Image (cartoon, rainbow, N blue to C red):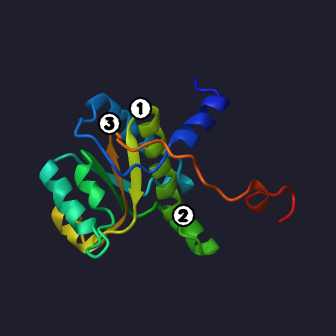
Amino acid sequence: MIGGKEMLDLIIRRQSDRKYSDRQVEADKLERIIEAGRMAPSACNSQPWKFVVVNDSRLVDQIAEASTEKITGMNSFLRQAPILIVIVRENPNFSSKVGSAIKNKDYSHIDIGIAAENICLQAAAEGIGSCIIGWFDEKQIRKILGIPFSKRIEIIISLGYSLSDHRDKKRKPKDLTVSYNRY
């Protein structure tokens, strides 16, 4: 079992990697990464996600094209990633839907965020780099992957062996982001 300090070290080590080698991710590591996402908690256990794992290099290329901003080239690094996980929002179960309506809060977005972070942390534990992407042409990716028009693609996670240097995290000072017992 991982200890508290080791877990924090893993969280600190995890970063958004945008440069990957051509080394393929081993099937057993990929399965553990996917399982980490699948085991994420969700409101009323609704599990409002489907993980579309893309490891066909032609499809990765097409998705990279649909995710690259043409003027700045943002997200062009996706072409290097051997694996993309496209997270599609599924309909939440009845209890979660009712709770969302009562509280005016879409819990499925929170649930998908938790699943995505589980995926990224497991990837880091496996020595695999990752990056969560929110900028892409959803309509085009739906077409590429045969995702029904009624479904939303929330995020894409790139996975691969990172060639990026480790970067120290830059965060706001703790006194600006944490308080106890009062705002």
Residue drawn at 39 percent across, 42 percent down: 129
Res 107 label: 2
Q: Position of residue 128 (x, y in %)?
A: 38, 37
Q: Disc 1 designates what residue?
A: 126
Residue 181: quadrant of the picture = bottom right
Relative to 36, does residue 89 appear above or below in the rendering? below
What is the three-letter code of the residue carrying label 2? Tyr
Regarding mark 1 in the picture, which secondary structure is present there? Answer: loop
Q: Position of residue 10 (x, y in %)?
A: 55, 36
Q: Disc 3 designates what residue?
A: 30
Mark 2 surroundings: few (<14), some (14-19) or many (≥20) residues within 10 A: many
The earlier-in-sequence mark between 3 and 2 is 3
Regarding mark 2 in the picture, which secondary structure is present there? Answer: helix
Residue drawn at 83 percent across, 66 percent down: 183
In the image: residue 171, left or right of residue 19: right
Per the model, the C-alpha gap separating discs 3 and 1 is: 9 Å
What is the three-letter code of the residue carrying label 3? Leu
Work out which quarter of the rendered image holds the N terminus and state it. Answer: top right
Q: Position of residue 35 (x, y in %)?
A: 40, 38
The earlier-in-sequence mark between 3 and 1 is 3
User: Which-is-in-front pick, marks 3 and 2?
Assistant: 3
